Image (cartoon, rainbow, N blue to C red):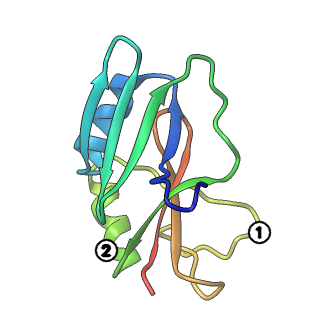
Amino acid sequence: MLSDSKAFSGIGVDDLGAARRFYGETLGQRVEVLDEQNGLMTLHLAGDRPTLVYQSPGMTPPNYTVLNFPVDDVDAAVEWLSSRGVTFERYEGMPQEPNDVMKGHGPDIAWFKDPAGNTLSVLKED
């Protein structure tokens, strides 16, 4: 029954305006506000992968990564995002380079948060 359903993901945020600026301006993604009054926005990701971003007052961000951006060069992506004001996360026990990229334990990866505290990453594309 659901095998042909065009499923999509959703990300809760506590401030739709801050999310629109972060995803649209800082990350350079195409965003479309669907319903400002009810706090609904679509994040149009490459590869025709729409993701619903919805306002959820009092939301608690999950403790896992909700969105991954595969890139050719993680170090270059970190440098570009840092120049746009993005701060990267450091995790105790994770062997991260000085620029916060973890290498040698799976794909190269670096984590950062959106304004609502959701964890995102840039990781080496296979």
Q: Decide: is 74 above or below 2.
A: below
Q: 10 Å neighbourhood of mark 2: few (<14), some, or many (≥20)?
A: few
Residue toward you, 57 or 111: 57
**Amino acid type, mark 1:** Gly
Residue visible at 68% across and 42% down? 62
Residue toward you, 18 or 76: 18
Are the residues at dot 2 and dot 1 in contact (C-beta closer than 8 Å)? no
Q: Position of residue 43 (x, y in %)?
A: 33, 44
Residue pointed to by mark 2: 76
Residue visible at 40% across and 20% down? 39
Residue visible at 23% across and 51% down? 28
Pick the quarter of the image with the N terminus.
bottom right
Answer left or right for 72 relative to 125: left
Name the residue at the top extreme. 37
Answer left or right for 24 relative to 66: left
Q: Position of residue 108 (x, y in %)?
A: 52, 80
Residue visible at 55% across and 22% down? 56
Residue toward you, 98 or 42: 42
Total numbered circles? 2
Residue pointed to by mark 1: 93
Residue 96 figure quarter? bottom right
**Amino acid type, mark 2:** Ala
Q: 10 Å neighbourhood of mark 1: few (<14), some, or many (≥20)?
A: few
For mark 1, give the secondary structure.
Answer: loop
For mark 2, give the secondary structure.
Answer: helix
State the separation of the CA atoms marked 2 and 1.
24 Å
Residue toward you, 106 or 46: 46
Q: Decide: is 95 above or below 54.
A: below
